[in-house]
Amino acid sequence: MTPDEVDELIDRWQAAWSSRDPDAFADLCAANVHYEDPLTSDPLEGAAALGRHAQMLWTAIPDARLERTGARLTDGKFVAAPCRLLGTHRDKLGPFPPTGRSVVINGVFYGELEGGRLRRVRAFFDVYTAARELGIMPRPGSLGERALIALRGFGVRLER
């Protein structure tokens, strides 16, 4: 694929994540697409499974939108596409109740291309920062963070 064709494919991929249409992935992915991200316990197989996974995001963050944040890198066989997810946490996300907080989550999609479609995709997202923004993890430097570090066995260094 040419860089322009890859850009168009990734533009459509990002639009699918913002579309609220679980079928939007079908035209972008190979029939047996393999997908992983930090929230999948096991790799997903097929566009239908990917669409169901996206529905969980749209339920938890109904205004979720994916934006391009930089140049895509491609050699015609693989692509790396930086992005960010923006939205407001309005419903349950896994075991976490809605917080009503806005999130900005930076990430990168790394994909293998086959026949003009995505064959394998791994998404890497900054889940630690997202957890902090949602109040699931304590803010850096806070008493809560120091307590968490102490519980993990790293000890606490008191500033003087």
Image (cartoon, rainbow, N blue to C red):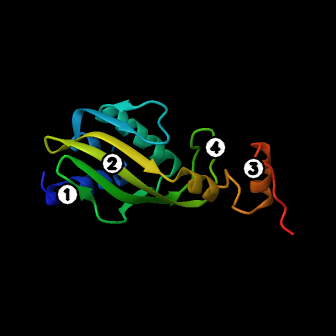
Given the image, on which type of amino acid does mark 4 rest? Phe
- Point out the tag, 4 or 2, that comes first from the N-terminus: 4
Question: What is the spatial separation of the Cα atoms under label 4 and label 3, in whole angstroms?
Answer: 21 Å
* Residue that numbered label 2 is attached to: 110
| Crowdedness near tag 1: few (<14), some (14–19) or many (≥20) residues, C-alpha within 10 Å | few
- Point out the tag, 1 or 2, that comes first from the N-terminus: 1
Question: What is the spatial separation of the Cα atoms under label 1 and label 2, in whole angstroms?
Answer: 15 Å
Which secondary structure, mark 2?
A: strand
Q: Position of residue 99 (x, y in %)?
A: 64, 54
- Point out the tag, 1 or 4, that comes first from the N-terminus: 1
Badge number at residue 149: 3
Report whether 1 appears left or right of 156: left
* Residue that numbered label 1 is attached to: 8
Q: For residue 103, what is the image quadrant?
A: bottom right
Badge number at residue 96: 4
- Marks 1, 3: nearer the viewer: 3
Given the image, on which type of amino acid does mark 1 rest? Glu
What residue is at 49 percent from the left and 45 percent from the top? 59
Question: What is the spatial separation of the Cα atoms under label 3 and label 2, in whole angstroms?
Answer: 32 Å
What residue is at 56 percent from the left and 61 percent from the top? 102
Does residue 80 show up?
yes
Report whether 38 appears left or right of 155: left
Which secondary structure, mark 4?
A: loop
- Marks 4, 2: nearer the viewer: 2
Question: What is the spatial separation of the Cα atoms under label 4 and label 2, in whole angstroms?
Answer: 27 Å
